[in-house]
Amino acid sequence: MMIVPWIIWAIFRDRRNSARIFSVGLLMIVISEILDAFGVSYGKWAYPIKVIPLATVSFSFRLSVLPVFAMVLLQFKPQLNPFIKAIIFGGFGAYVGLPLLSMMDLYKKIDWSLTYSFIILFFMYLLAHWFSRRNSFEEINKNTDSH
């Protein structure tokens, strides 16, 4: 779950927009790490099995599956309504991904509803979509000096 999604993305990525889409993936990783730290700290969920010795570890889901899935959705059918893609992203993450992690004893819901995860993932995707459409991704020129 940690390596295969990145290999898939590397093979099928849109090479003209790789940096832009990879930046969105990094944004998704940062946001999910911060939200996960809050959730674990406040006892909303836990990770019974630690894959690596870190405080929280649904590592592969947060650092690989979710960001790569968002990046693939961003470049697949870019003209499709982002709200539809956000529903797909939120639904997959909350109602498929988390129950699978739970069945594998990698995730345990304590005081949390999957619907909350759906809402958070829905808005994370919309933020990723918005970020990916910014025009500020331009080449840095040696000749351009801002001083």
Image (spheres, rainbow, N blue to C red):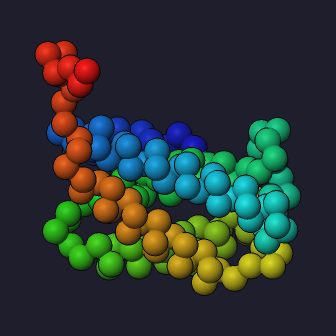
- Horizontal arrangement in the rendering, residue 130 relative to residue 92 (left or right): left
- Horizontal arrangement in the rendering, residue 47 relative to residue 8 (left or right): right
Expressed as whole percent of the image width and height from the top left, the position of residue 118 reads 55, 77
Expressed as whole percent of the image width and height from the top left, the position of residue 115 reads 60, 84
Q: Is residue 39 above or below residue 18?
A: below
Residue closest to the eye, 51 or 18: 18
Q: Is residue 28 above or below residue 26?
A: below
Q: Residue at x 74, y 65 (%)?
A: 39
Residue closest to the eye, 106 or 32: 32
Corner quadrant of residue 94: bottom right
Q: How many marks?
A: 0
Q: Residue at x 68, y 59 (%)?
A: 36
Residue 31 in view in this figure: yes
Q: Residue at x 34, y 73 (%)?
A: 85
Residue 96 in view in this figure: no
Corner quadrant of residue 77: bottom left
Expressed as whole percent of the image width and height from the top left, the position of residue 10 reads 35, 38
Position of the C terminus, as image quadrant, is top left
Expressed as whole percent of the image width and height from the top left, the position of residue 105 reads 79, 62
- Horizontal arrangement in the rendering, residue 52 relative to residue 71 (left or right): right
- Horizontal arrangement in the rendering, residue 81 relative to residue 101 (left or right): left
Q: Residue at x 85, y 58 (%)?
A: 48
For this orientation, the residue located farthest to the front is 147
